[in-house]
Image (spheres, rainbow, N blue to C red):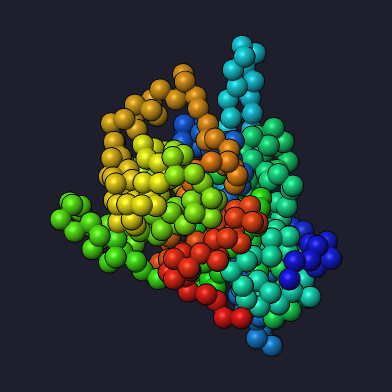
Amino acid sequence: MEASSADTVRIVSRRMVRPSYGATPMPPSEDIHLTPWDLYGISVTYIQRGILLPKPPAGAGGETSLFNSLASSLARAGRYYHFAGRLALEEHGDGTVTILLRCTGEGAELVHAVAPGVAVADIVGSVYTPSSVVRAFFPLNWPNGVRGADAAMDSSLPVVWAQVTELADGVFIGMSMSHTVGDGTSFWDLLNACVLQHAVRRFELPPVREGFFTFSDSRARANDEMAGVAVAAISSLQTLLAHLWRAVSRARLLPPGQEASYALLIGCRGRLSGIPPGYVGNAIVFRVIKGCTVGEILDKGLGWTAWQLLNRAVASFDEAATREWLDRWAWEPTFLPPVSSHGGGARVTASSSRFDVFEQERSMSLEVWLAPEVLQRLVADHEFMDAVTVPPA
């Protein structure tokens, strides 16, 4: 199914959800100064994820009850107060500006929508994601997405949005959060605080055609290939990323001599001392793996690619260098580069399978967004698909 979103999803109501403290007075307004990690991501679009749930049983109040319950949970979420604020831009008249998270308690926007012509099978019945429909399941359905810089320039834009969409036989809950005020860990902490059911699927909003794949664990093969060479075990995630990198390079028909690179967003929680457990801002660094060709990652095998490039890149994380970058950022600011689904041999991976997604066992699933003809070649690649668990029709 690939219908127009205007034909399938209709907005029923909108509500601004403000923090609720019961008998406790609302905290005074405060300004939170953003870290270099936060400001580094101001150029990227909001984090957008969703969960697909079964239709509430008859007599349970239906989707309207779910919508009201989500509003109540969102208002009472323990650390939600900061996310109920707005980004603010202050000009100093000397060519410099300050961007703040202004905690005024203005709230997050919650949208109620219906899509009676869309069934759960339309979303999960194929490795291809029906992009135009799924895109309408999120409230920030702008053609080019919404970035932190947009929210800083327009103080009416909340930093958190959510949407409950009633389907023919299920419910989709989509949430969007500015990457300037939090990373994936913070996002899932908030969503866990609001929705306690088990997730069925997760979705993101790429600008091209998407596919959703669940993979078998190939780390034994990767470690066997590197037996006697690697000094540490290759993980399941590193194996999966290497498998994807090699397969996408084949699907793009890249020449063997072309440089191949892979960009990773590496989480600093657990790697950088001094980050408190309750910290809800960004804590990520951008690493680009270079120094090899397409021919090398294809010819030298899965184990070599996972070990030489991905395992060693993560292991090379340098706490001292990261602290130096944080200290230097205010004087030499840089920003995350835009992500392109076209171009050369570069790959980018973000959003870890290790995030606390509704306290489930960690799945080995990925969403892949590529040019349509490239994705078509990818699903026809036997080596790639041998590691994929295809969803039932």
The residue located at (60%, 55%) in the rendering is 374
Q: Which of 269 and 85 lies nearest the eye of the viewer?
A: 269
Q: Along the line of sight, which residue is nearer the eye, 18 or 231?
A: 231
Q: Position of residue 293 (x, y in %)?
A: 40, 41
Q: Is residue 317 above or below residue 173?
A: above
Residue reaching furthest bottom? 58
Q: Position of residue 80 (x, y in %)?
A: 55, 52
Q: Is residue 131 visible?
A: yes
Residue extending furthest toward the top: 94
Q: Residue 359 at x, y = what percent? A: 43, 68
Residue 270 is at least partly visible in this image: no
Residue name at image x 58 percent, y 25 percent: 98
Image-based side of 12 in relation to 175, left or right: right
Residue 75 location (% of width, % of height): 61, 58
- Residue drawn at x 60%, y 44% as measured from the top left: 342
Q: With 290 as the anchor, is 303 left or right in this view?
A: left
Query: Would residue 316 be found to the left or right of residue 126 on screen?
Result: left
Q: How many marks?
A: 0
> Based on the displayed image, in which of its 4 quarters is residue 21 positioned?
bottom right
